[in-house]
Image (cartoon, rainbow, N blue to C red):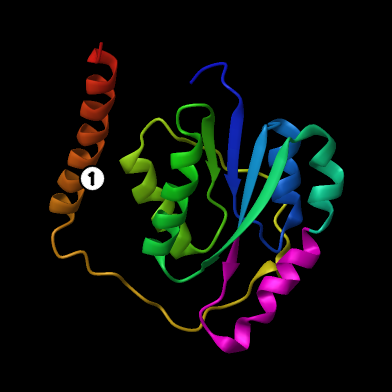
Amino acid sequence: MQGYPLLIIAFPTFNYKEMYALLNEITPQYLVLIEGNPREERNRWRLEAIRWINRKIDRDFTPNIKGISTKVVSTFDYIETIDILNNIYKDYKYTHKCIVAPTGSKLQTLGVLLFKQMYPEVQLVYPVTTKFSKEYTKGCLNIYHIDFKNFSKIMVEIGNFRKAGLKQIESMLLEP
């Protein structure tokens, strides 16, 4: 997809400088912002806070970006993240180079990893700011883990998914 227009899929955070660093370096034709919807009711305020913190993105970058859209996805459901990425990618995969900036929650980032395994042509970019805010986070409450019973089988299934897509493209190209 070298030379194609760019689609950036990004996860806004409390650190708006990450988004600005990304968009100052790369100007996409389309930008899809995936906002994280916290799992626990007591943390729902975070979604509005992140929207407020990143509110100037539209104003500052709209003149250079053809379209900015927003999706809301759980911060705790990596499968939902894969589904939304897959739905977005279906609309752009033949016309745009897809770049994902996985700055969302840890489980959203796991979803991005598995999505990247499904579509190796997708590029990952990590926006880096000059310094990390000390007040950005402190401590942790619970530690969760995911037990992948047979991770190698999952990776084989993802490989089969990729091969099925390639076979579909091959048959399209061979049609008279």
Residue sitting nearer the eye, 69 or 39: 69
Q: Horizontally, is 26 left or right of 94 in the view?
A: right
Residue displayed at 86% across by 44% down: 60
User: What residue is disc 1 on?
Assistant: 158
Q: Horizontally, is 74 left or right of 152 in the view?
A: right
Residue displayed at 80% across by 33% down: 64
Q: Quadrant of residue 132?
A: bottom right
Quarter of the image with the C terminus is top left
Magenta region includes residue 42:
yes
Picture coordinates of residue 79 (x, y %)?
A: 36, 62
Judged from this view, the residue extending furthest toward the front is: 176
Residue displayed at 60% across by 39% down: 8
> Considering only vertical position in the picture, is 77 above or below 10?
below
Give the residues in magenta: 35-54
Picture coordinates of residue 105 (x, y %)?
A: 52, 64
Magenta region includes residue 126:
no
> Considering only vertical position in the picture, is 166 above or below 87?
above
| Structural crowding at the residue carrying mark 1, measured as other residues with C-alpha within 10 Å and reported as few (<14), some (14–19) or many (≥20) | some
Q: Amino acid at mark 1?
A: Ile
Picture coordinates of residue 68 (x, y %)?
A: 70, 46
Residue displayed at 73% across by 61% down: 133
How many callouts does the rendering have? 1
Q: Horizontally, is 151 left or right of 49 in the view?
A: left
Picture coordinates of residue 41 (x, y %)?
A: 58, 87
Q: Is residue 129 at all visible to an observer of this figure?
A: no
